[in-house]
Image (spheres, rainbow, N blue to C red):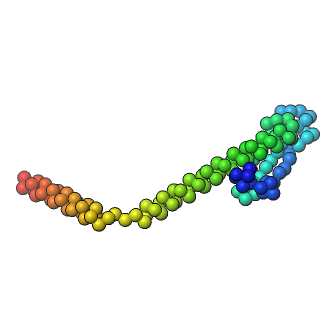
Amino acid sequence: MERLKIRPQDIQERFIRSRGPGGQNVNKTSTCVCLRHIPTGIEVRCQKERSQPLNRMCARGALIEKIRQHLRVQEMQERAKRAKEKKARWRRPEYLRQRLVESKRRHSQKKRARAKLLEIE
């Protein structure tokens, strides 16, 4: 949690009653754990186990994984943005531009020459 810079103050914790099979235990105890990371707004619920401490541990692991994934996506978007800006700043050197224009000119001359042959027929 230290590497991801997640502080315990940033995590909001709630305990709610589970749903599904389980009989009286489900109706009486609040074993479902709901964790919310306030800065990112990511929310995780866990009710896999019958005990609250195990669900709490499971929910923390899931929350950390979701935050890691969120940070990876943000990093990839930032890289793509920087690459796009870098590409926009790049300008073709003058000699390449001249070569390209000359190539286009030759191609257009070839096409014009073909058109004249077709008109004669």
Left or right: where 117 falls relative to 102: left
When asked about the image quadrant of residue 108, the answer is bottom left
Q: Position of residue 54 (x, y in %)?
A: 83, 38
Residue 22, quarter of the rendered image = top right
Left or right for 77, reference 59:
left
- Residue 118: horizontal and vertical position, in percent? 11, 54
Q: In terms of depth relative to the viewer, which is nearer, 30 or 3? A: 3
In this rendering, does residue 46 appear at all? no
Does 84 sit left or right of 96 as displayed?
Answer: right
| Residue occupying image coordinates x 70% and y 52% | 4
- Viewer-closest of 23 and 13: 13
**Is 19 on the left-hand or right-hand side of 90?**
right
Location of residue 12 in the rendering, given as x and y in whole percent from the top left corner: 81, 54
Q: Residue at x 74, y 50 (%)?
A: 1
Residue at 16% in and 60% down? 109
**Farthest residue in the front direction?**
3
